[in-house]
Image (tube, grey):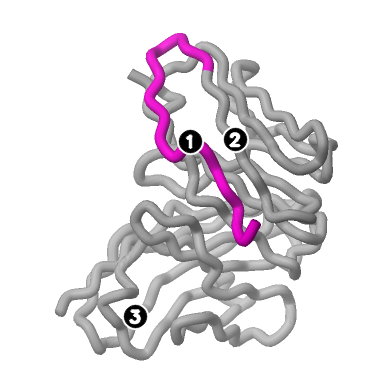
Amino acid sequence: AQSVTQLDSHVSVSEGTPVLLRCNYSSSYSPSLFWYVQHPNKGLQLLLKYTSAATLVKGINGFEAEFKKSETSFHLTKPSAHMSDAAEYFCVVSGGSQGNLIFGKGTKLSVKP
Amino acid sequence: GAGVSQSPRYKVAKRGQDVALRCDPISGHVSLFWYQQALGQGPEFLTYFQNEAQLDKSGLPSDRFFAERPEGSVSTLKIQRTQQEDSAVYLCASSLGGTNLNYGYTFGSGTRLTVV
């Protein structure tokens, strides 16, 4: 069975400092992995996806993530946080043959001025 | 349309009332998914349609939940005899390419259901 674990429920950073949101996955086969962002009262927006191509994936708004099979990790990073990055972030793994997605519990990112 | 549209945006129901939630996917999108997001949690899969066929309903929490997509476009999620534990945001997502994950998914803004 597929699952994801987001290691931090809340991360707080200062504007201009790096962001690290941690995610570990479990999958019985080579997974597809995603990061989604959810701003308050907005729909889920895809930041980036890994589908067995390059292990370092670049997404929108300066975010990137690295797929590490040996560590079963897919951590999300950004070199410099912006106030507009404050939101809930979800690590997601593909669930199976029907393409449904399995979400982690989310990490709330706060950005201090 | 340009995106996935869900209505109503908010719904308050009395316990025991039936509700119907609507999803208008992007035109031409083959796949349609429903997810339930409880407060402070990640979305959880409910059901999946490919065109008008409901191929997976394993996530529906009880037989009070029913979904349909009769013409392969608009979908309705119906909850009968609502209970307080049904309070959540119900998200709809659509995708162009069936189960091919390379096509990606577009999510709607959701319907927030509160059962009182």
Residue under pointer 2: B22
Is residue B100 shown left or right of residue A25? right
**Seen in the image, is B27 located left or right of residue A36?**
right
Mark 2 falls within which chain?
A: B
Tell me which chain the residue with mark 3 is part of. Answer: A
The circle on residue A58 is none
Magenta run includes residue A36: no
Measured in 3D between alpha carbons, the distance from the residue under mark 1 to the one under mark 2, in whole angstroms, is 7 Å
Q: Are marks 1 and 3 in contact (CB under 8 Å)?
A: no
Q: Residues within 10 Å of mark 3 (few under 14, many from 20)?
A: many
Look at the picture and state if B41 lies above or below A19. above
Instruction: Look at the numbered discs 1 and 2 and tell me whether their residues touch, using CB distance below 8 Å.
Output: yes
Q: Is residue A43 left or right of residue A7?
A: right
Could you give the CA–CA distance between mark 1 and mark 3, rounded to whole angstroms?
36 Å
Residue at label 3? A19
Amino acid carrying mark 1 in the image: Pro
Image coords of residue A80 (percent x, y): 32, 88
Q: Residue at x 81, y 60 (%)?
A: B97
Residue A58 pos. (x, y %): 56, 85
Q: Write the residue at 57% across / 25% down.
A: B20
Amino acid type at circle 3 is Val
Circle nearer the viewer, 1 or 3: 1
Residue B8's disc is 1
Disc 2 marks a residue whose amino acid type is Arg
Quadrant of the image containing the C terminus of chain B:
top left
Q: Earlier in the sequence, mark 1 or mark 2?
A: 1
Q: Which one is nearer the viewer's eye here, B48 or B2?
A: B2
User: Where does the magenta region start and end?
Assistant: B1-18
Whole-percent x, y for residue B15 in the image: 40, 12
